[in-house]
Amino acid sequence: MDISVVPVDRLARGASLEIRCRLSHFDDQVLLLIDEDENQQSFRATGLSDESRRRESVMNEVNTCSLDNIHFWVAPELTVPLALQDEVGGWLAAINATDLLLCVPGSFHCQDEQGHWRNTAQVFNGNGSRLPKQHKLTQFSWRPAPGEASVHEGILASRNITVFLTPLGLVGVAICKDFSDASAVEIKAAWDVIAPDWMLVASYGDREKTLKRHRERAREHASLWGTRSLIANQEPFVGG
């Protein structure tokens, strides 16, 4: 596992402030569109049923972060396509959200420079400056019915973790299973060694399983190292 540390020296009013965080959930009835391969063994997100409505939802979140002087903002996994994530950077540059230290405006499936499909989250600070992208480290999978073959996320798993050294401590970014999948021994070991002060987690899943695992892992992080985990989750709402 390749681990990089990126300094983020930005906090306008000093570290003695109350730390304000925002976790987004989009209640705009926009479907995630997915497509399976011909063997129905892998899937990828192809878009959203109403990108203009989601764009309005995301813009409202950006404006709220600025008005409420938010320090950390996280949006859920598979809710914001990369082009819309890029727009977030432009909006932040225009309004200059002074207190916003780091934001993860969701993630989505997209192709990298080498043509590999990734589950990617672009990270920004409050003036819209791009920080290194985080690519998902583990593929999501599920079994439609007992005895049937499992269906997995059609992405290339990354082996690069970027953590951000900020005035409020060391911050890690995780995409769903990258945070709570204890079976991914190498990834779990990496977070155990890094022991960040904060974890910003973009998640997509149900309350009964996904959020339960996330909460268990968050309690474990908090007990061992005092890590504060910010988990933005979207319940499945899928078409296609």
Image: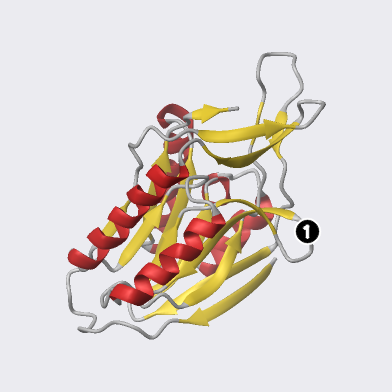
Q: Quarter holding the C terminus?
A: top right
The figure's colour scheme reads secondary structure
Which one is in front, 159 or 181? 159
Any part of residue 219 in sight: no
Seen at 48% across and 60% down, the residue is: 85
Which one is in front, 26 or 224? 26
Tell me: 88 left or right of 98. Answer: right
Seen at 39% across and 48% down, the residue is: 232
**Disc 1 marks which amino acid?**
Gly
Above or below, 64 against 128 in this view is above
Above or below, 80 against 200 in this view is above
Tell me: 130 left or right of 9. Answer: right
User: Residue furthest toward the front?
Assistant: 52
Tell me: 81 left or right of 224. Answer: right
Which one is in front, 140 or 39? 39
**Where is mark 1, residue-wise?**
115
Q: Residues within 10 Å of mark 1 (few under 14, many from 20)?
A: few
* Residue 227 quadrant: bottom left
Q: Position of residue 135 (x, y in %)?
A: 62, 59
